[in-house]
Image (cartoon, rainbow, N blue to C red):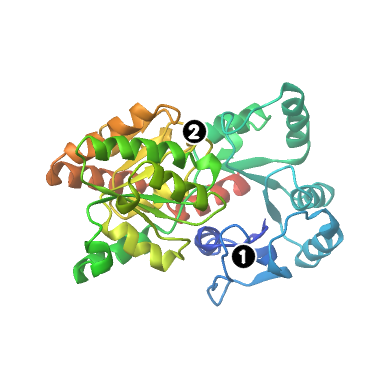
């Protein structure tokens, strides 16, 4: 018997997705279908795929959103590939609905790839009822990130026994080995002058709550704290954040690094003392995976979907309420007051925890769900 052919759809396959696809392709025959060749928000270029994994791209250029007009093309692509199962990204967009309906009409199982949680955005009862009917009608199971997304997916009508974990994972070895190699060579002068520093990685946008992080950091500095703050990312709020840093008097202590590809991010992770992720809304927070794989502790908003799975209070980091500037400040102080041995132990605990969240786990869970009796 040949390997199960599985179609995986996404708007654009970036580095995170490629790690999952590569692992899944070890146990299944993957048909990877992306709508766009590049992703607009992060500026990802085409990611190199291994020779035995072919990516089918329906449109060149940047992602623009709005996939409903592509329904006939998606339908034809799936019909030509003729997969035995389909992994579908969500339930709201035209791409997802087209793929799920195709699977239903062709009597192929469709797995929902879901990272949403009940608390990552306001929920309306009528909308949740509609989603529940849709999910129950079209999907045979789901693969999710962790306990919060599993609970929300179950509320949408997917049975607990048909939910697998491991959706929100990164290539741990890439970050662990890359940072270890960089650390052996010593920091470049640019980063040596900035050390020690807190590290934020992500878009500079309102939902990331960086204004309050800057307020907390300014209080920390005025109280005698001597660590700096690195913001690695770009986005629409960059100008406002630079103005805020100036108003708070911490411009000299805050470094705006701009958007950086994964290879350049390794330098940022390698020489940071810890990650800070203060988001108002974050379905998961893959930068926490990256930082933990790099051996860093993490200070994370309790709104982030990953915290129940990845953060142990006092073990590998601390949680805070994102609207409480004082709580964020307290976490900054907690981290800086630890000696280097204690911080290293927290980083080692991060490494231990994240070892259970790998692309191979994603592949195993997908395989388990598809091969289970229906």
Residue 374 at least partly seen: no
User: Which of labels 1 and 2 is toward the front?
Assistant: 2
Circle 2 SS class: helix
Seen at 29% across and 33% down, the residue is 331
* Label 2 packing within 10 angstroms: few (<14), some (14-19), many (20+): some
Which numbered marker is on residue 227? none
Residue nearest the viewer, comparing 221 with 32: 221
Residue under numbered circle 1: 29
Q: Residue at x 71, y 47 (%)?
A: 110
Q: Nearer the viewer, residue 29 or 349?
A: 349
Q: Position of residue 60 (x, y in %)?
A: 71, 72
The circle on residue 147 is: 2
- Residue at left 62%, top 62%? 39
The numbered mark, 1 or 2, whose residue comes first in the sequence reads 1
The quarter of the picture where residue 262 lies is bottom left
Q: Position of residue 78 (x, y in %)?
A: 78, 61
**As displayed, is residue 26 above or below residue 291?**
below
Determine contact: label 1, label 2, CB under 8 Å.
Answer: no
- Disc 1 crowd rating (10 Å Cα; few below 14, some 14-19, many 20+) is some
The picture quadrant where one finds residue 159 is top right
How far is mark 1 from mark 2, CA to CA? Answer: 29 Å
Residue 258, horizontal then vertical, whole percent: 45, 61
Task: Name which quarter of the figure residue 310 lies in.
Answer: top left
Does 6 appear above or below 186? Answer: above
Where is residue 207 drawn, in percent x and y? 54, 40
The reply to whether residue 362 is in sight is yes
Where 247 falls versus 147 (above or below)?
A: below
Q: Is residue 14 left or right of residue 211?
A: right
**Residue depicted at x 87% and y 60%:** 72
């Amino acid at each position: 018997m040949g390997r199960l052919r599985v179609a995986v759809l996404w708007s654009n396959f970036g580095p995170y997705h490629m790690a999952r696809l590569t692992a899944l392709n070890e146990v299944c025959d993957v048909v990877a279908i992306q709508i766009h060749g590049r992703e607009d928000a992060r500026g990802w270029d085409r990611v190199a795929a291994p020779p035995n994994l072919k990516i089918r791209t329906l449109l060149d250029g940047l992602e623009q959103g709005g996939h409903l007009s592509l329904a006939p093309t998606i339908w034809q692509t799936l019909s030509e590939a003729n997969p035995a199962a389909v992994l579908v990204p969500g339930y709201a967009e035209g791409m997802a609905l087209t793929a799920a309906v195709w699977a239903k009409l062709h009597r192929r199982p469709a797995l929902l790839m879901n990272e949403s949680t009940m608390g990552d955005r306001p929920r309306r009862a009528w909308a949740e009822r509609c989603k529940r009917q849709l999910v129950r009608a079209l999907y045979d199971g789901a693969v999710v990130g962790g306990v919060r997304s599993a609970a929300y997916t179950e509320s949408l009508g997917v049975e607990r026994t048909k939910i697998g974990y491991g959706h929100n994972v990164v290539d741990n070895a890439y970050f662990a080995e890359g940072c270890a190699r960089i650390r052996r060579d010593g920091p470049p002068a640019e980063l040596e002058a900035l050390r020690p520093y807190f590290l934020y990685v992500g878009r500079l946008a309102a939902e990331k709550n960086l204004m309050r992080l800057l307020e907390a950091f300014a209080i920390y500095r005025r109280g005698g704290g001597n660590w700096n703050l690195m913001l690695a990312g770009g986005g629409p709020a960059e100008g406002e954040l630079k103005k805020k840093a100036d108003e708070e008097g911490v411009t000299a202590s805050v470094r705006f690094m701009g958007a950086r590809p994964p290879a350049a991010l390794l330098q940022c992770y390698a020489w940071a003392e810890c990650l800070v992720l203060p988001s108002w809304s974050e379905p998961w927070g893959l930068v926490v995976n990256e930082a933990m794989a790099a051996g860093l502790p993490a200070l994370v908003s309790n709104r982030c979907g990953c915290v129940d799975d990845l953060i142990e209070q006092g073990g590998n980091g601390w949680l805070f309420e994102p609207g409480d500037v004082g709580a964020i400040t307290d976490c900054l102080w907690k981290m800086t007051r630890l000696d280097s041995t204690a911080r290293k132990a927290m980083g080692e605990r991060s490494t231990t925890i994240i070892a259970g969240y790998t692309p191979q786990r994603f592949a195993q869970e997908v395989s388990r769900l598809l091969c289970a009796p229906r």
